Image (tube, rainbow, N blue to C red):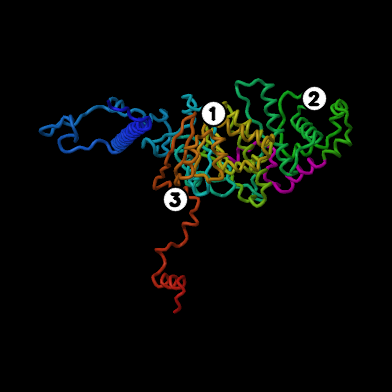
């Protein structure tokens, strides 16, 4: 009779079986893992490279290889049918007529632009626009090209030139710039009234005219003083303006008398006519004259000092500016040395032009504000810009402001200040914006104010000269601005740099001497 195996031997046998089973399971798991990784690699390779093919079909089992090559005729179809094969590839464009700008770099289609047609089509909600771009990116070329091409279709333009940059192109288009400066003999009236629109009542027109004039006067005085006006100074200006226009309470004048800077200055001491108003406000004449002395001296300086002979006209200014010509240019290069004077002269010139531009029946017009950040640093002038933005739709005017980068607005005021809020609101009210190349430091602000995505904002760093990102009604286009051979010499801002002698113009012997000198080779 066989003796049973000891318990110790049975345990050893079970452990061996379990160990062999575990090793078999591990081997199968490793084999399955390797098969899965290999399948993943093959799938990824096929997705990236596609199936391998020879002359007759794909390699592999059940690939349906052909015994001979099939020869099929080329398929012909209309573009309306073919576009269904490749959806979302070709952008349909804006769908409105306009001047030719260049090529859409994504769709390779022609890009046309007309703010008035876009507004009528509902693509944009405002005909006003913003153009930003680093120096040398093509911003100025775009603005000058618009002048040329809109001129070709009969749309006039008006510009305030503070850098003497538009003189040459204006003369080529048959326009002689109006040069303003001390002793040049040209006088404009920045307080000339805007004509009443048929949709405005008399009361509305009088109120808007007074608000516009007060905004201009406050802005000019604040720019020169470098601070906000006091309530007494503002009251003195308002009473002087009402006296000048014959609208002081108690006067029986039905129409507005002409207003001018010398007229307002002359009436700032007419306290004898303000007795009733001053008593109602609880202030005496001597106190008013004393506390408004600074504002009065600033106006005196404008009329008889820094801007003497430039903006002290008593009448309208249309005899100096021919608005029947293809365009108008007011050249302020003569006052460029003083930034405060430049700002005041720029604002006065723009205000003088508005009296003619914003009238019923006037032709639609393109207006350019280059170096706009100079005027946007002052709250009253920002309010004036904002008012003009609102009136543009009523009078058919397209305003375009241009500066280098949106970080220039940091000089407007601290975050949360009234100036910063007005500047941001002005940019948000633009119907279209165009951004040329931007630096890394300007990208966050540009992305925020223009509503760009991360990809769009990063693209701004790599735009080449003449390439701009256009934002119109929530749509984005990257457009390469194309210049004709006739336009290129007219729009180059760096023409003086290009006029210098080039490498090819240096004689061989002089070139060899320069090279030896650079390499440190002695004669």
Cβ atoms under marks 2 and 1 closer than 8 Å: no
Residue 85 visible in this rendered orientation of the protein: yes
Q: Nearer the viewer, residue 84 or 369?
A: 84
Q: Earlier in the sequence, mark 2 or mark 1?
A: 1
Main SS class of the magenta portion in the image: loop
Query: Dot 3 corresponds to which residue?
Result: 489
Query: Dot 2 corresponds to which residue?
Result: 249
User: Would you identify the image quadrant in which residue 82 lies?
Assistant: top left
In the picture, measured across the screen, residue 158 lies left or right of residue 59, that is: right
Q: Is residue 319 magenta?
A: yes
Please state the horizontal and vertical placement of residue 221, each as a whole percent of the image: 74, 40
In the picture, measured across the screen, residue 4 lies left or right of residue 193, that is: left
* Nearer mark to the viewer, of 3 and 2: 3
Q: CA distance from mark 2 to mark 1?
A: 38 Å
Q: Is residue 101 magenta?
A: no
Q: Earlier in the sequence, mark 1 or mark 3?
A: 1
Query: Dot 1 corresponds to which residue?
Result: 126
Q: From the viewer's perspective, is residue 251 above or below residue 41?
A: above
In the picture, measured across the screen, residue 66 lies left or right of residue 125, that is: left
Please state the horizontal and vertical placement of residue 5, each as a whole percent of the image: 33, 29
> In which quadrant will I find the C terminus?
bottom left
Please state the horizontal and vertical placement of residue 381, each as a whole percent of the image: 67, 37
* Nearer mark to the viewer, of 1 and 3: 1
User: Would you identify the image quadrant in which residue 427 lies?
Assistant: top right
Q: From the viewer's perspective, is residue 270 above or below residue 513?
A: above
In the picture, measured across the screen, residue 41 lies left or right of residue 71, that is: right
Q: Earlier in the sequence, mark 3 or mark 2?
A: 2
User: Would you identify the image quadrant in which residue 32 lies?
Assistant: top left
Q: Which residues are magenta?
A: 293-322
């Amino acid at each position: 009779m066989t003796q049973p195996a000891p318990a110790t031997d049975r345990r050893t046998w079970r452990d061996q079986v379990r160990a062999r089973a575990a090793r078999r399971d591990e081997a199968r798991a490793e084999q399955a893992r390797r098969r899965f990784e290999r399948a993943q690699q093959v799938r990824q390779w096929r997705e990236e490279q596609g199936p391998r093919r020879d002359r007759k079909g794909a390699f592999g089992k059940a690939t349906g290889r052909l015994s001979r090559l099939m020869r099929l005729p080329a398929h012909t179809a209309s573009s309306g049918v073919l576009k269904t094969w490749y959806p979302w590839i070709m952008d349909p464009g804006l769908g409105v007529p306009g001047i030719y700008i260049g090529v859409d770099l994504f769709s390779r289609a022609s890009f046309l632009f007309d703010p008035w047609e876009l507004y009528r089509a509902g693509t944009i909600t405002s005909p006003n626009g913003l153009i930003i771009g680093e120096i040398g990116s093509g911003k100025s070329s775009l603005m000058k090209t618009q002048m040329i091409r809109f001129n070709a279709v009969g749309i006039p333009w008006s510009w305030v030139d503070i850098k003497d940059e538009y003189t040459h192109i204006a003369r080529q288009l048959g326009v002689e710039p109006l040069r303003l400066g001390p002793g040049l003999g040209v006088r404009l009236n920045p307080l000339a009234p805007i004509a009443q629109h048929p949709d405005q009542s008399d009361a509305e027109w009088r109120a808007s005219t007074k608000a516009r004039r007060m905004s201009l006067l406050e802005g000019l005085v604040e720019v020169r003083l470098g601070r906000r006006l006091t309530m007494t100074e503002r009251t003195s200006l308002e009473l002087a303006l009402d006296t000048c226009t014959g609208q002081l309470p108690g006067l029986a004048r039905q129409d507005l008398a002409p207003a001018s800077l010398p007229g307002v200055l002359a009436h700032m001491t007419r306290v004898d006519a303000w007795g009733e108003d001053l008593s109602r406000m609880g202030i005496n004449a001597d106190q008013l004259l004393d506390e408004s002395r600074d504002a009065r001296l600033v106006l005196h300086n404008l009329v008889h000092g820094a801007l003497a002979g430039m903006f002290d006209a008593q009448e309208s200014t249309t005899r100096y500016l021919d608005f029947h010509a293809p365009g108008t240019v007011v050249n302020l290069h003569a006052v460029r040395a003083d930034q405060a004077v430049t700002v005041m002269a720029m604002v006065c010139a723009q205000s003088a032009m508005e009296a003619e531009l914003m009238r019923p029946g006037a032709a639609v017009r393109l207006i350019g504000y280059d170096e706009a950040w100079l005027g946007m640093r002052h709250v009253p002038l920002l309010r004036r810009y904002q008012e003009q933005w609102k009136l543009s739709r009523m009078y058919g005017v397209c305003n375009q402001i241009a500066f280098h980068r949106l970080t220039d607005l940091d000089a407007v005021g601290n975050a949360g200040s009234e100036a910063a809020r007005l500047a941001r609101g002005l940019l948000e009210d633009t119907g279209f914006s165009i951004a040329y190349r931007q630096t890394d430091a300007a990208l966050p602000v540009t992305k925020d104010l223009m509503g760009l995505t991360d990809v769009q904002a990063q693209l701004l760093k790599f735009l080449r000269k003449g390439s701009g990102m256009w934002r119109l009604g929530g749509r984005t286009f990257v457009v390469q601005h194309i210049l004709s051979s006739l336009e290129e010499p007219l729009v180059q801002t760096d023409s003086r740099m290009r006029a210098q002698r080039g490498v090819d113009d240096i004689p061989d012997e002089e070139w060899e001497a320069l090279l030896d000198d650079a390499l440190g080779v002695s004669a």
